[in-house]
Amino acid sequence: MMSIKLPLWLRATMLIGAAILAAGAGLFGYRYFTHPVTLTVAVGSIDGEAAKAMSAIASRLVSTNASIRLKIIDSGTALGAADLFSAGKVDLAVVRGDVGDLSQAQAVVVVSHVVALIIAPPGSTIDSVGKLKGHTVGVVGGVANSKVIDVLSKEYGLDAAKVFKEIALSDARRAIQSKEVSALLVVIPLAEKYLSLVRGVFQSGPKTVPVLIPIDSAGAIAEADRAYESFDVPKGTLRGSPPVPDDDLTTLQASLYLVANKKLGTDLMTRFTQTLMSVRRDLLGEQPIFAQITAPSTDQDAYLPLHPGAAAFYNGTQQSFMDEYGNWIYLTPMVLGGVATVLAAAWKFLGIGPATREGPLDSLYALARRIRKVDTEAELSDIEEEIDNILKAERAKSARGDESAVDDATLNVAAHRLESLIHDRRTLLATRPAVASAA
């Protein structure tokens, strides 16, 4: 009824407006679901290398148009990164397993490993941690290494306040030369860049080499505190000729993790882990440091639990094609059917296109309304002729075998009804003059 009453231009305007709104909503939905997700990641190291490495990953994600992007927040230290993460200010963080509050952390990848090195200057007689009593050890990295200091003090009966002293890396050489400290404690990756920094602190020659002090109780410490592992520093790691150490040396190792907040979605972290490991392969040729990125332990009792999304990637339990797109495959035909229905309704609303052709029964039923309004015998005769023509045409179609022809029984019923109406109307018309004369 509305399409009949409203003018065509108004109906067309209404449909165009509805189409624009639907298209806008669809575009908004598409942009919303395809827009890259940005995750904030806190990093920190005294030399800035952690921020550089993560920035390289972030840049590669942008250049490859990945669905996940990274926003790097450089906190300056590993402890600063852990504090930002525990405060809930970032989604991800690169943290040491022995630093900060990691109660909300779940591992994604192991970025690297760091080892504790206690180094005395050439000629030192200190060859064990126990002999550090009565001496001062300079701790490079300070607060970030407070847990290392605690476990060493507890295991070897050292007075942490008297033995260990925080110093800046820039002051380490002066402190050693002035004998302000008798040894240095550093916790670093065993990479050439960091080893070169350590070598630069000590003056050494062919016959004067620094002394690496073993942590013989590393195994016992690791059993008591799962943030650590016992690790053997390979012979000659610090210097090759003469080798320092002169044999494999036992010390403590901690892992450097990229962790995610446990609240992050499983699907999101599965995609992120897959993307991250792919980017790692791409960057290996440019920066060998990325070779140290490995999968964390997938054991149920691992020190840092694995994020379920990362676990799905490492265990190969990602959703299959049908799992991921099954709903779309099921819903698409329904959506297309709905669209087709809407288009058909719009076409009908506009009232354009060829009119629906009436069938013979429709024509016969329409004649019934005319019969009730006829005022003359001549009009009834015309209607009778129309009825005869319709019946004749349908019988001809039936004789030709046309399947669209109405069956004879139906036609006869309709025709009989019309004949009764015509008879009643004739009778009524015949009585009208007599009634008028009497009046």
Image (tube, rainbow, N blue to C red):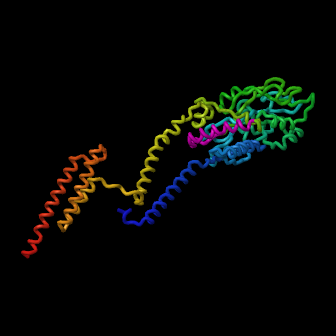
Expressed as whole percent of the image width and height from the top left, the position of residue 338 reads 43, 49
Image: 258 above or below 417: above
Q: Indicate the quadrant where residue 54 lies.
A: top right
Residue at 58% across, 37% down: 309
Q: Which residues are magenta?
A: 259-284
In this image, 235 relative to 373: left or right? right
- Of the pair 358 and 174, the residue shown nearer to us: 358
The quarter of the rendered structure image containing the C terminus is bottom left
Does residue 266 show up magenta in the picture? yes
Residue at 18% across, 68% down: 376
Expressed as whole percent of the image width and height from the top left, the position of residue 213 reads 80, 29
- Of the pair 325 and 237, the residue shown nearer to us: 325
- Of the pair 315 and 160, the residue shown nearer to us: 315
- Can residue 103 be seen at all in this image of the molecule? no
Q: How many marks?
A: 0
Secondary structure mostly taken by the magenta-highlighted segment of the chain: helix
Expressed as whole percent of the image width and height from the top left, the position of residue 322 reads 51, 36
Residue at 81% across, 43% down: 168
Q: Indicate the quadrant where residue 236 lies.
A: top right
Residue at 90% across, 35% down: 203
Instruction: Give the residue furthest to the left.
Output: 438
In this image, 273 relative to 19: left or right? right
- Of the pair 334 and 326, the residue shown nearer to us: 334
